[in-house]
């Protein structure tokens, strides 16, 4: 494996949080993730996984690091839609179009693993809980888009920034990358501005107000929530939209052989 690729833990933590029955990942499921992680290849910060206007090349699992989904308008302005975390699928829904509708760029040094449609079919047959956990991230992303539209249409700048801080704290906690109170913010103020439809100076002023009101503490890129309840009241934040649980799959035969054979053709063999 490329030594630049991080550990398996964020990917495991994120997908385990989406297992419908609340049970931990089983041995075979962990092994699938381990082999997918072994197959991942490094993507340098600033390099694209998906490029707007070009064929997407399929689906990609973000194994480590952070990425941004964004679209460039004809006037050159950029709108960021989503901050992808380990366990998110990249290239959806671009894979269903001739050309990608948006771009995905590595926000940090990251690692990704390509998944063919054949492997996804086999994964649903062999490991339905894990497959549903993967796709539940898409439901969570759609819920975040709704919240973002509500924020841009109805919330003031201070409320938008407060809501985004709480959202990132919750999502990073689910990926094992924070304790829900303190975390490393992977975005710059300029990138936060692109997400929220604000200017960078405006984001800076709103963060300063949140600090002055004793709601958060910011040191370099580290953020600590000092009064989560008051921050949630200000932002009208209800984290239920982040609590995505995969739908319970019907009992399926453990057809692991199909998935193992498919994965073996594309990299390291899987062993249940």
Image (cartoon, rainbow, N blue to C red):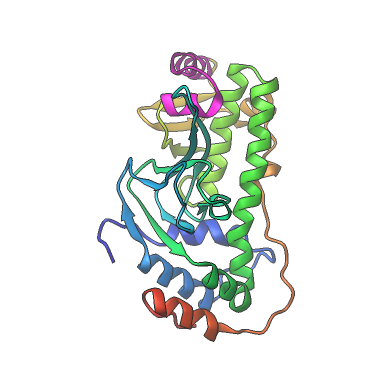
Q: Quadrant of residue 196?
A: top right
Q: Is residue 9 visible?
A: yes
- Stretch in magenta: 190-212
The residue lying at 67 percent from left, 34 percent from top is 147
Classify 235 as above or below 20.
above
Q: Is residue 120 magenta?
A: no
Q: Is the magenta stretch mostly helix, strand or loop?
A: helix
Residue 135, position as x, y percentages in the image: 61, 59
> In the orientation shown, which residue stands out farthest toward the left?
3
Classify 117 as above or below 77.
below
The residue lying at 64 percent from left, 64 percent from top is 132
Quadrant into which the N terminus falls: bottom left
Residue 223, position as x, y percentages in the image: 45, 32
Residue 90, position as x, y percentages in the image: 50, 52
The residue lying at 70 percent from left, 21 percent from top is 154
Number of numbered tags placed on the structure image: 0
Classify 264 as above or below 53.
below
Residue 40, position as x, y percentages in the image: 37, 63
Q: Can residue 234 be seen in this view?
A: no
């Amino acid at each position: 494996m490329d030594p630049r690729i991080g550990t398996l833990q964020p990917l495991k933590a994120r997908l385990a949080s989406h297992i419908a029955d609340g049970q931990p990942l089983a041995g075979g499921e962990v092994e699938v993730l381990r082999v997918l992680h072994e197959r991942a290849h490094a993507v340098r910060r600033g390099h694209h996984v998906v490029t707007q206007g070009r064929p997407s090349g399929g689906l990609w699992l973000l194994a480590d690091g952070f990425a941004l989904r964004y679209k460039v308008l004809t006037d050159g302005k950029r709108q960021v839609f989503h901050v992808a975390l380990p366990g998110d699928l990249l290239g959806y829904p671009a894979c269903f179009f001739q050309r990608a509708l948006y771009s995905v760029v590595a926000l940090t040094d990251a690692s990704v693993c390509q998944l063919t449609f054949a492997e996804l079919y086999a994964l649903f047959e062999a490991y339905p809980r894990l497959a549903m956990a993967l796709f539940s991230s898409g439901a969570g992303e759609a819920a975040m888009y709704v919240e973002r539209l509500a924020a841009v249409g109805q919330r003031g700048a201070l409320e938008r920034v407060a809501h985004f801080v709480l959202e990132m704290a919750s999502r990073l906690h689910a990926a094992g990358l924070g304790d829900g109170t303190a975390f490393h913010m992977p975005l710059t103020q300029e990138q936060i501005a692109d997400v929220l439809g604000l200017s960078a100076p405006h984001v800076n002023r709103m963060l300063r107000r949140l600090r002055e009101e004793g709601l958060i503490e910011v040191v370099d890129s580290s953020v600590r929530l000092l009064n989560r309840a008051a921050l949630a009241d200000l932002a009208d934040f209800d984290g239920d939209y982040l609590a995505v649980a995969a739908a319970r799959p019907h009992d399926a035969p453990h057809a692991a052989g199909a998935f193992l054979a498919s994965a073996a053709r594309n990299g390291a063999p899987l062993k249940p």
